[in-house]
Image (spheres, helix red, strand yellow):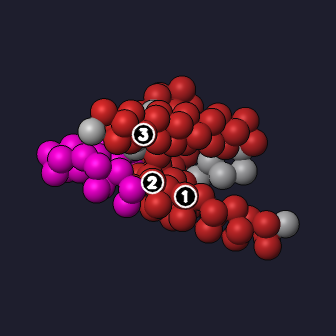
Amino acid sequence: MKKWRVHYRVIGLFSVLILGLLLGKQFPPVYFKLFVAVNALSFIFYSCDKYYACHHKQRISERTLLTLSFPCASFGALMAMFLFNHKIKKGRFMFLFWCVVLLQIIISFSWVWYKNQTM
């Protein structure tokens, strides 16, 4: 099981990094700065939720975390999840999270394809 978990993390990290590198060349610098800011915000929210979980305080809902991850903030969420070992054992949450990532990839590649077709 541990061996699969390591591969799962590596595949997830590389897919998000490749997406970021691919889209970094397609977007103007202001969008890249916005991408970094949204991912930092997502990282902070996931980190706060882990802190709240450890200290038995009121948690941030899973719906809020997934909604925050949707606008291309999955990289920050993924970093916080694996850095703090947070929410990675929740099967339903991870399934929905990877559905969000897949949807982001489809939308991003569609946008890049459309942009290249109109040039």
Give the residue at x 71% y 68%: 7
- Checking the image for residue 19, the label placed there is 2
Mark 3 crowdedness (10 Å alpha carbons): few <14, some 14-19, many ≥20: few
Give the residue at x 35% y 51%: 23
Question: At which x and y percent is residue 26?
Answer: 29, 49
Question: At which x and y percent is residue 19?
Answer: 45, 54
Name the residue furthest left.
30
Amino acid bearing label 2: Leu
Residue 26 visible in the current orientation: yes
For the residues labelled 1 and 2, the Cα–Cα distance comes to 6 Å
Give the residue at x 72% y 51%: 89
| Residue at numbered disc 3 | 113
Q: Which residues are magenta?
A: 21-43
For the residues labelled 3 and 1, the Cα–Cα distance comes to 18 Å
Mark 2 crowdedness (10 Å alpha carbons): few <14, some 14-19, many ≥20: some
Dots 1, 2 in contact, CB < 8 A = yes
Question: At which x and y percent is residue 66?
Answer: 51, 33
First in sequence: mark 3 or mark 1? Answer: 1
| Residue at numbered disc 1 | 15
The kind of secondary structure element at disc 1 is helix
Amino acid bearing label 1: Ser
First in sequence: mark 2 or mark 3? Answer: 2
Question: At which x and y percent is residue 35?
Answer: 28, 46
For the residues labelled 2 and 3, the Cα–Cα distance comes to 14 Å
